[in-house]
Structures are given as structure tokens and as C-alpha cells.
Amino acid sequence: MKSIFLSFVLSIIGLSLFAQKSKTYNLSFKDLAKQWDEAIPLGNGMIGALIWDKENTIRLSLDRADLWDERKAFPIEEHTFEWVTEQVKNKTYAAAQKWGDSPYDTYPYPTKLPAAALTFNLPSLGKVISNTLDIHTATHTLTFDNGTIFTNFVHATQPIGYFEIEGPTATLATPTLVPHTYQAANDDGKAVSVVSGQSLTRLGYKGGQIERSANQQRIHQTTYDGRYFEVLLEWRMISPTKIIGLWTIANNNKADLSQEIKQISAPTLRRTHENWWANYWSKSGIQIPDELLERQYYLELYKLGSSARNGAPAITLQAVWTADNGGLPPWKGDFHNDLNTQLSYWPAYTANRLEEAKTYTDWLWKVRPANLEYTQQYFGVSGLNIPGVLTLNGYPMGGWIQYSLSPTVSAWTAQHFYWQWKYSMDSEFLKKQAYPYIIESATFLKNITFLKNGKRYLPLSSSPEYNDNSINAWFPDWTNFDLGLAHFLFSAAAEINEAVGQQEEAKKWLITKAELPPYALNQTGMLVAVDKPMEHSHRHMSPYMAIYPLAQLDINKIEDKTIIEQSLTHLEKLGTRAWVGYSFSWIACLHARAKQSQQAVANLQKFASNFCSVNSFHLNGDQKGGEYSGFTYRPFTLEGNFAFAQGVHELLIQSKPGYVEIFPAIPSQWENVAFENLRTEGGFLVSAARIKGQRTHIEVLATAPGTFTLMYPGKLQAKQGKKISLHKNGLLYIQLKKGEKIVLEEELKV
């Protein structure tokens, strides 16, 4: 519930946050989409549906997050990191390329699998005049010209989808389950690009078996090694003008709706679904005077709520919306830990969606045993690393091995354990998961590096996809990507040891960090690697990891300011022709960290206007014919969407090592801005409003005891007599108990 303070402030300036706004954020069309990547998306983290028009039917493309074919294709046990190092050194790298690439490109598995489709005869229902997704309630509604209404949702917490058709033609639209074509008589068996998606028939499955009865249909689809999945549909006629039904998907189990179907007529199902979403939306809200960005922001939070849930796997490239085009999903729908999974969780922490954020660390913890084995086998040292490209159960899939088998992947995934702890201050999570994961990752990185002239180095280093898959993608010295991760990881190891009372161990990690060389720099700012500047437009912002997300460089520090500004100026000169959608989201975060608000906003606008489908899905390429990028293709992946949401957060509030900034990158023309309950490191919930560009109101609630440290350029006063202290370094220190709140006001500028 909004505080009395913020309600008062917002009433003054005429603003209202999400719960009070009109439904301008909804997806609303006059008819159904004609292709799957423009469809209406529904989901609950485990199951999902895309609703569109295929061949004159209403098609619900059904999906389940843990449907995978995990047959092994990549022979990881054949070689080691030491062997790869030798191939680079001896200039015989073709052998390593073949070893890494051939299985990923040649075999259709391992891969994410689509489930099936649920269809309704469209002409029998009438002509669609309205197609709307209400993101407040995660409910989709089709309205027809004869008054018939088709309503459906994927339940927020139960593994079921619900539909309801009411109107004069309701009973004419008998639902039908349609299996995917896993077997075809005339299939040529040829592989196609992993981006466009290899044919499902290459998996070699038998066609799904369909069982039908009066009001039930079941698909039993065998997959591999005796495994299977089932899709179950049940419906019933409530009256001559109304039918309702449920569907579910079971993985390697018999699908069952016996309990749910008994209470289908009760309002309980809808009420519990809508209650979950009401609670989800109450967590936080923003108000910015840019309708394009604000609408896209809330659509991103809707997708986050639809694709992340306790007990479900981490968000893959497409989450619960696997391609429904007769092929495998782009890049096999896998877990890409060279940025895709990481970026997908960026906004969850600031948006105060820690339960959704924890789905990533939960999954990382689940696959940790497999990753420990991989680390020992491939790298030959103790500690923890994780493949950059891996399956549901944590096994390496191959691909470009500079990135799919990079030695710094766990340094980046460890940041999410660090963030989950820092934003929650959960002591149990710290002890049971964050501490062991970070220390194991740091131990591995220390073990894999070596000392030379007092400095610590990797045997080989890389920067994601710079020089693609050539031997030149390996560098004999640190890349700034790997080096930034090393600096972060050893710092985090020291901090987390100190947090659990192990002071001596903390000191040892700081000594290890001090052994790292400085970043590679020249007049263009941060380089890709030593003596290697960024020479051309490049989609990955990985050389600039130290700026964001690692926050190892800070624009407020004199020694860092020039480096950051030179780096971003150089990127602007190189242009955006080789960027994809997520590049614009990431660069917006970088510009926000540099307090370059105009550039940050401009890049967010480019993302939202050029790189998204009509349903808000990130389509990688420039959908306006290459206005900003030479990539004009449309493979759907989610990381650009979620990095966009974090880009908006970075305009409003930033957590930095040791302090917080509020409104650090707001354009001068944004006079009235507000946000409610955005979360910072230290476990603080912050609400703030900027009024007519002159006055700021701030409210801070501590969810854990601690000191809220704020950098703010104006003069703030505490209401209700709370004592605050201003130190010489310009930081405001406020000691708060758990549950304690403080209100700060800025003196009106004359």
C-alpha cells in the first residue's frame, strides 16, 4: 500500500503509480496476430501460452519450461582447457573449433522442446473486434462481433491454463489439442541454422499419440531414452452459451486435472490468480514523463512476472514462449551465461522482485554439482565454474568455446548470489548459498590463474564474441571483460568473508585482488584487451563490465570519470551498425552510470521503437529496416527486454558500492518523476518524487537494520526529528532499524 507521505506528494503533482493508472499499458489490438512472435504471451514461470491466429484457428502455443532433450552431443571429456591453450599456442586451433562447434551445429540436441497447441475454430466464433491482454490481472480477452467473449489465463501459481467462452456461438468452438510435428514422412533430415531453428523432425521422435473422449483430450509424446511428456485438456459445457476448460502439461509424468476440474466452476481459481498478480504489482512502481518508455517498462515487468517463479528453471532465451514454427527455438532455447541469463535478472533486484530474482540463484544452486564436476574435469582444478552454454541440468553444450567454456562464467553468475544477498540482507541465504558459491568461484579463479612478475594472469582470456570464433578471439593477456569479473569476484569474496566474521580470510582475498593488473586503457578509454582497442561496432558491451554491471568504476571518482567518458565517446564514434537489441538496453545502463541522461533515454527509445515486436518481445534485429543496426532478423530472446527495464531503473536510482544515488540520470526536461518502493543494496525500499524539476521528496524504509548512505546534490532535511549526519565526503548517513522509516525533503530552490 502506498504510504500517506507519497500519496500526498503525488496528489500535489498530479501523478499516480501503476495501481491507479488507466490501462494504457495493456496489449490491445483489433484482431489476432498472424505469427507466433507477435502473439499474446501468458505464463507463470513453468508453463506458458502464446495466443494468435494460425490457419483460421485461435491457436494457443503451449509450453513448459523444463521440457528438454538432454541427449549428449558435446564430448567435453575429450579435451581440457590446457589442451585448448596448447592449440592456441601452436596455431592449430582448427581442431579446437571443430571440437566445440561441430556438435552444437550438427546435432539438434540438447535443446528446449515446445509442447503442443490448443486450437479453436475461429469462424465458428465470429469476427474478432478486440484482442486484449490486461497485464494487471494477466488475463487475455477476445471479443467477437456477435457478443461472444473468449477469456483465458495461465494460473499464477498452479500448473494449469484456464479458458472460458461465453456467448451465442460458444458451444460451436470445440477445443482441439494439436501435437507438434516431431515425425514427418518427407523430411530430408537436413540441418539449418541454429538461429532460425532446426526442424523438430530431426530429433527422431515418433508422432505424439492422441487420446480423445467426450470432454477430454490427451497427447502422449515420447521423446528420448524412455522419457515423455503429456498435454491434457478437459472442458465442459456450463450452459448452452458457455463452456469452460483447463489444460496442463506434465513432464515425464501422467498429466492429471482431476482435482482442478472439480472446482472449475468456482471463482477460486480466478481469485487466487488475480490476487497473486495484485500482490506482484504492489511491490513497486514508477512514473516517468515518456509514454513509450513507461509502457515498455511495465510490459517488461509483466514478462518478468510471467517467466520467473519459485520452483521453475531459470529464464532461458525464450522462457515459456518457445517458438511455434515447426522448428527448434533460436539457439536451441538454451541457457546462455555469457550475458543472456544474467541480463534477464537485472531489473528484479531494483524492482523489489526478490522472489523472482531468486529463481536464478535457485537454478544455479541446483546445477552446482554438475558444474563442480565439469570444473574438475575440464579445468583440472578445485573450485566452481559453470559452462557459458548449458542444458537444463547444467551440462555443457559446446559452441564457440571462448565463451561456452570461458574461465570467468561463474564470476558473473556469482554476482547474482552477491546481489540476492545485498538487496535482501538475508543472513540465511548468505550462509547457505551466497557464501559457498562465491568462495568456490573465487577459489577456482585463483587456482586457474598464475603469478608472473608479481601479477596474476589467466592462461587465455576472451571478450564475448569479439573476433567471433577465430583464434584471434583468444588473448594472451587479460581482456577487460575477464579482468573486471576477477576484480569483482575477489572483492566479493573478501566482503562475504567479512560478513560471516572471517576477517583473516577476507584479507587474503584482498591480497589476491591486489595481484591483478590494472585495466587496459588508452585515449579511447577501456580497451578490449592490452593494446587492443575496440576497433569496430560490436554488439557486446563486455569490455565495459567494470562500469556496469560490476560497478568497479564510478563516475563520481575523479580517477574513473575520464575513463568512463572516453569509453562511451569512443563507442558513439564506432556507431551501432553491429548492435542488436540488447546492446541498446545495455548501453543505456552505461550512459546512466555516466550520468549522461539524454544518451541513456535515446537508446532506450531506440530499443522500444525498433527492436521489439508489437507484443513487446525483443526480436534482436532492427524491425524498421535497419535504421540503427545492420541486423534486421527477428529471433526472439528476452534479455534485451529485461535489460531495458533496468535501464529505466538506472535513470531513477543507483546502488553503488557503499552508497545510493537518487535521480542520478534524469533528463532536465523530466520535471515530474516518481517511483515507489524501488530496492537498494542494504535492503532499503526507497520512494521518491521530483516535483516540477525543483523539489524532491524521499522516503526510505529499512527491511533490515543498517546505515542508508545517500549521495544527493541538494540539501535534504529529515522530517519527524530523525537525526542525520553529513560527512565531509558529501554522503548522508542514516542509521535505521528494521522496519524503521525516514522521510527526507529537499529545500525549495529560489
Image (cartoon, rainbow, N blue to C red):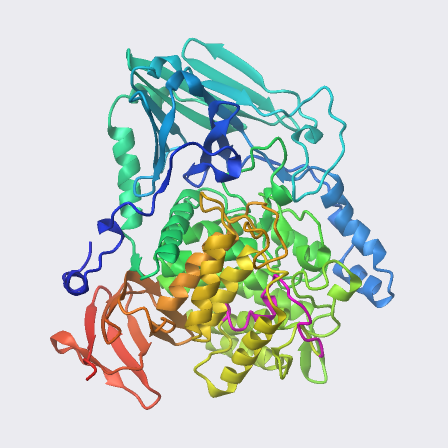
Q: Which residues are magenta?
A: 531-550
Pick out the residue farthest to the bottom.
Answer: 728
Which of the pair 677/578 is nearer the observer? Answer: 578
Quarter of the image where one finds residue 290 = bottom left
Which of the pair 628/136 is nearer the observer? Answer: 628
Q: Is residue 430 left or right of residue 611?
A: left
Which of the pair 98/377 is nearer the observer? Answer: 98
Q: Position of residue 79 (x, y in %)?
A: 79, 54
Does residue 345 appear in this view? no
Does residue 149 appear in this view? yes
Q: Is residue 239 left or right of residue 651?
A: left
- Give the mark count: 0
Q: What residue is drawn where x is 54% and y is 65%?
A: 439
381 vs 505: above or below: above
> Which quadrant is home to the N terminus?
bottom left
Q: Position of residue 668 (x, y in %)?
A: 34, 74
Quarter of the image where one finds residue 693 = bottom left
Pick out the residue farthest to the left.
Answer: 720
> Which quadrant is home to the C terminus?
bottom left
Q: Give the dominant element type of the magenta stretch: helix, strand or loop.
A: loop
Q: Position of residue 501 (x, y in %)?
A: 42, 72
Q: What residue is drawn where x is 42% and y is 46%?
A: 303
Q: Is residue 201 left or right of residue 732?
A: right
Q: Position of residue 153 (x, y in %)?
A: 36, 32
Q: What residue is drawn where x is 57% and y is 72%?
A: 572
Which of the pair 512/410 is nearer the observer? Answer: 410
Q: Is residue 284 magenta?
A: no
Q: What residue is drawn where x is 66% and y is 72%?
A: 534
Q: Is residue 660 left or right of residue 473?
A: left
Q: Is residue 539 magenta?
A: yes
Pick out the residue farthest to the top.
Answer: 214
